[in-house]
Amino acid sequence: MAYADPQSVTVSGTAKSLPRTGSGTSSGVFNTPEGDLVLSVSHQTGKRYRRTVRLTSNKVVPDALQPNVNTPVSASVFIVADVPKIGFTIAEQTALVAALTKYLSDTTNANTVRLLGGES
């Protein structure tokens, strides 16, 4: 089964439509036509299952060291579910993902702010 085309991601209150731009046996890529937002989903199988969803924001910023030069930069956030092939149901895995995302996105995003501020 594949993710629907397009996917929608809301960043800072703005919904972005991301049409599928790539696919493979165990992966899919979605991005805005401008390329400023990319969603990728991939799966690796070995001794364990490794499921990854990644959101990347791309932009061009003025270079602080070179006047009149713009530099492309990107930032990514991703979640990896790394589970054994036996022992955890999809429901149990879903509960772990939900717990972590809820922990990071409480009403004030305080734990996300702490994480990005370098606290541990």
Image (cartoon, grey):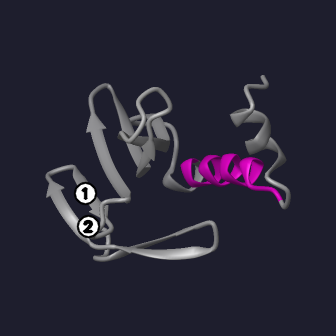
Q: Is 35 left or right of 101, judged from the image as shown?
A: left
Horizontal relation, residue 83 to residue 34: left or right = right
Residue 82 place in picture, x, y as percent: 46, 34
In the image, residue 100 lies in the stretch drawn in magenta:
yes
Residue at figure coordinates x 26%, y 57% from the top left? 29
Residue type marked 2: Ala
For residue 117, above or below residue 77: above
- Asked whether the residues under the numbered discs 2 and 1 touch, taking CB atoms below 8 Å apart as contact, a structural biologist would say yes
Q: Residue at x 73, y 44 (%)?
A: 112
Q: CA distance from mark 2 to mark 1?
A: 8 Å
- Residue 2: mark: 2
Magenta residues, dominant SS class = helix
Quadrant assignment, res 67: top left
- At x 51% / y 49%, what residue is drawn? 89
Whether 24 is drawn above or below 70: the answer is below
In the foreground, 18 or 95: 18
**Looking at the picture, which amino acid does disc 1 mark?**
Gly
Which residue is found at the position 33% from the left and 68% from the top?
A: 32
Q: Earlier in the sequence, mark 2 or mark 1?
A: 2
Q: Quadrant of the N terminus?
A: bottom left
Residue 104 pos. (x, y %): 73, 48
**Mark identifier at residue 28:** 1
Q: Identify the residue at the far front of this view.
A: 67
Residue 77 lies in the magenta stretch: no
Q: Could you tell me residue 17's position as x and y percent?
A: 39, 76
Question: From the image, which quarter does the C terminus lie in?
Answer: top right
Q: Tell which of 117 and 80 is nearer to you.
A: 117
Mark 1: secondary structure: strand
Image quadrant where residue 19 sits: bottom left
The residue lying toward the viewer, choosing from 21 and 98, is 21
Q: Which residues are magenta?
A: 93-106
Q: Is residue 101 above or below residue 83?
A: below
